[in-house]
């Protein structure tokens, strides 16, 4: 898959293409439907498929300080889009100047002049241009004017719930990682570098990897989780604690993973946690012994959950 930073970077001689546009944070099942259809249409027409997305999130530029929690960081997002078969990924820097482009200018300058769109595939709720003034109806009108067609697959839903990034963020924030996984089509992933903590887990007999997540990422609610830790191409069972360690009067919110059946030093490594289920909420214990007893129960439950 070719990767471009900015639509001005489209190589000379790039032919006509089928384009899909969106923030695509999460690359969830709804996004997969849209991107998959663009790839399918391109192959049937003998054209190239291009996925257009934006960095930073448009909300951060339009309303500074309102950046939503990130479900997939850029590198992971690109991997997921490539796995769907896209021929090219164009990441457009979302600047104040770009945000002021009118829908007509966006249609002509981005879709026609640079990407040579023959077809544009977007969701039913797609908006574009300055102040999100453009919708699917306007895009269709621009297509008639500029020579491209517009295709809109239906929204992906289950039990009257529309799978959206907003919905998934709410699930993650509530600790319902199972519901988030259903909407994503895979477990919610949290990536980061392992840093040194208080080494309290080592003293308790359950050494943990203290994960430092990236800025703005969607961290699940405080609690204990069953997860898979992805490291160097291998998956390890993990009991993950998110919270402030109230038993020890902690104040800093941390993500700590105890890897089952693992020995070694993870400091400085970048790992990923794929969350499968929330086991319980965070609790305060009257001393070390009841805490260790609970950790043993948690580890056993993690093994049962992940063995399934």
Image (cartoon, rainbow, N blue to C red):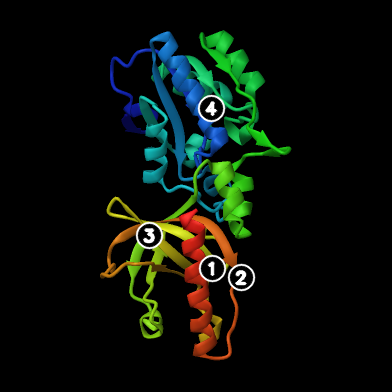
Q: Earlier in the sequence, mark 2 or mark 4?
A: 4
Q: Which of marks 2 and 3 is nearer the N terminus?
A: 3
**Mark pair 3, 1: CA separation:** 18 Å
**Mark pair 1, 4: CA separation:** 34 Å
Residue 301 versus residue 213: which sits nearer the camera?
A: 301
Tell me the element at label 2: loop
| Disc 1 target residue | 224
| Cβ atoms at labels 1 and 2 below 8 Å apart | yes
Q: Position of residue 215 (x, y in %)?
A: 45, 58
Tell me the element at label 4: helix
Query: Residue at left 46%, top 35%?
Result: 53
Tell me the element at label 1: strand
Tell me the element at label 3: strand
Q: Could you say which disc has been placed on residue 57 in the image? A: none
Circle 3 packing at 10 Å, graded few (<14), some (14-19), many (20+), is some
Q: Could you say which disc has been placed on residue 281 in the image? A: 2
Q: Earlier in the sequence, mark 1 or mark 4?
A: 4
| Disc 3 target residue | 192
């Amino acid at each position: 898959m070719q990767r471009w930073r900015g639509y001005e970077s489209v190589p000379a001689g790039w032919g006509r293409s089928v384009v899909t546009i969106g923030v695509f944070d999460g690359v969830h099942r709804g996004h997969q439907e849209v991107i998959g259809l663009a790839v399918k249409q391109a192959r049937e027409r003998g054209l190239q498929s291009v996925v257009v997305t934006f960095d930073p999130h448009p909300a951060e530029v339009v309303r500074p300080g309102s950046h939503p929690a990130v479900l997939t960081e850029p590198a992971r997002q690109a991997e997921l889009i490539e796995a769907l078969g896209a021929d090219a990924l164009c990441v457009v820097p979302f600047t104040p100047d770009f945000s002021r482009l009118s829908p007509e200018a966006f249609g002509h300058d981005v879709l026609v002049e640079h990407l040579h769109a023959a077809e544009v595939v977007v969701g039913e709720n797609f908006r574009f241009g300055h102040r999100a003034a453009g919708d699917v109806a306007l895009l269709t009108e621009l297509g008639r004017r500029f020579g491209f067609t517009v295709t809109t697959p239906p929204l992906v839903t289950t039990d009257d719930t529309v799978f959206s990034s907003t919905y998934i963020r709410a699930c993650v924030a509530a600790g319902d990682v199972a519901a988030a996984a259903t909407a994503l089509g895979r477990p919610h992933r949290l990536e980061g570098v392992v840093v040194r903590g208080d080494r309290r887990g080592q003293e308790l007999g359950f050494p943990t990897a203290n994960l430092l997540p990236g800025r703005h990422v969607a961290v699940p609610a405080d609690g204990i989780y069953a997860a898979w830790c992805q490291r160097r191409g291998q998956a390890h069972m993990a009991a993950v604690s998110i919270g402030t360690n109230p038993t020890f009067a902690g104040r800093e919110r941390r993500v700590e993973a105890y890897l089952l059946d693992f020995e070694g030093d993870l400091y400085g490594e970048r790992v990923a946690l794929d969350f499968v289920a929330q086991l319980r909420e965070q609790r305060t214990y009257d001393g070390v012994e009841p805490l260790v007893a609970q950790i043993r129960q948690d580890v056993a439950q993690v093994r049962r959950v992940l063995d399934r």
